[in-house]
Amino acid sequence: MPFAWGEWITNLLIDHLPTLSRLKNSYFDTNTYRFRFNHLMQHSIRLSLSLAGTAALALTSIPFGAARAEDTKVAQGTAKDLGVMSISLKDAIKPNFGFQGALQGAGTPNQAGIGGFLPLVTGDNSVFFLDAQANANFADYNNYSSIINTTVAGTTISTSSRLGYRFLNSDRSWMFGVNAGYDSRPMATGAADTGVNVSNSSTVFYQQVAAGLEAVSNTWNFNAYALVPVGTTQYRLNSNYSGGSLDTYGLDVGYSITPDFKASLGYYYQQGDLGTADGSGVNGRLAYNISNGLTAGVNLSYDQAFETRFSADLKYRFGGNGNKTASEKKAWQTPVIQSLTETVRNRDVRVHDATDVNKTARHHCVYTDNNGYSRCVYATPIGGRR
């Protein structure tokens, strides 16, 4: 069969191309020529197929579709080229809802829950919004404490809410935003992973206020944030350990390798748990948009208190733009426009626990006796805001 195809192509070229026809009449009107030319054609076809196969394998081996031409064009095009200037934000910005989940990290729990983004007021170039989540927090895995010594146990429900304002610059090449909110985290505790026997394990309640600043282009993104515990920040967790929520201040710088594949590197400073967790840290993240609204990420952090911690997360959001045209969706899928409805990051209440609670607990005066003397005892909580 390959020889028949080669002969047919040979005859077609010789009989229909003037140059080859002249060569045929002058020199190559022999069976020997036809055999050699057929052989050459077969070799060329086989070589082409081999190269095509090799190229296909190379393309499929590129992670996360980084070489997609359309994505590259979207990332590099101007706002005018992409039709961004003609977008009506009232059409592009719709409520979205879905679920999210994450594995335990540096002071954060295994968790899964639901969340949503609700635009409250949408202007010609801006949006005022509410972003809220509720998560079920699960026990630490493999007797490995997410807060250093004491394992998190049981199931509790944490909440997180943000009010924010995001707006585009004049040519819609950058999005800028500011947000603030409140987070809560009840935490049930269990055994220690240090081999120490503990008793009187308790369930405690932490809370914090938070604020953030954002700047996003089609290539770069910047995210500065502050997580500040309020109320009671230090509790006795059990007979041997106390735990405190952490102040955390950080800046993440991200880069869009493609519109769907993003990387970031960050610095943070943390303090708390009676000074035992004070210090700087670094973190890195890779995130990939698997399909519309479904995003997976991996995170790696290091600081002296928690040392190296790895975590992964998954988020899915579905919204109200499913009935739009392909050209409209393409314009809306630029990182700048998408960032207007993105979930706010860095919202977990982070907790660290220290050893020997009796050395760090403070007296708490609970009543006055008949002689006017204050009677003070160790109590839970053992400390307030410091």
Image: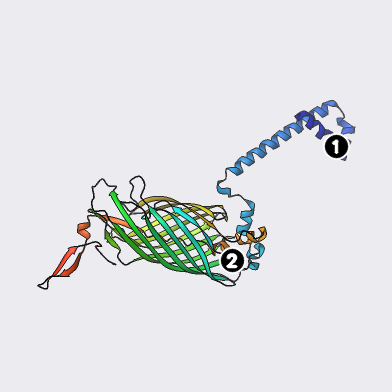
Q: Position of residue 198 (x, y in %)?
A: 23, 50
Q: Position of residue 243 (x, y in %)?
A: 29, 58
**In which quadrant of the rendered view does residue 47 lie?**
top right
Q: Is residue 216 left or right of residue 146?
A: right
Q: Amino acid at mark 2?
A: Ser
* Res. 75 visible in picture: yes
Residue at image mark 2:
173
**In which quadrant of the rendered view does residue 202 lie?**
bottom left
In the image, 263 versus 146, the foreground residue is 146
Q: Is residue 141 left or right of residue 16?
A: left
Task: Judge depth for marks 1 and 2 and give the one in front.
Answer: 2
Q: What whole-number distance in Å separates the C-alpha atoms at marks 1 and 2?
A: 56 Å
In the image, 184 versus 209, the foreground residue is 184
Position of residue 193 relative to residue 382, above or below, is above
Position of residue 22 relative to residue 82, above or below, is above
N-terminal of the pair, mark 1 or mark 2, is 1
Q: Residue at x 88, y 40 (%)?
A: 18
Residue at image mark 1:
20
**In which quadrant of the rendered view does residue 46 lie?**
top right
What secondary structure is found at the residue carrying circle 2? loop
Q: Position of residue 275 (x, y in %)?
A: 28, 61
Q: Position of residue 28 (x, y in %)?
A: 86, 30
Q: Pointer 1 and pointer 2: residues touching (CB < 8 Å)?
A: no
Q: Amino acid at mark 1?
A: Leu
Position of residue 289 relative to residue 32, above or below, is below
Say which quadrant the C terminus sits in: bottom left
Q: Is residue 371 left or right of residue 345?
A: left
Q: Which residue is situated farthest in the top direction here? A: 32
Q: Residue at x 56, y 48 (%)?
A: 64
What secondary structure is found at the residue carrying circle 1? helix
The disc placed on residue 260 is: none
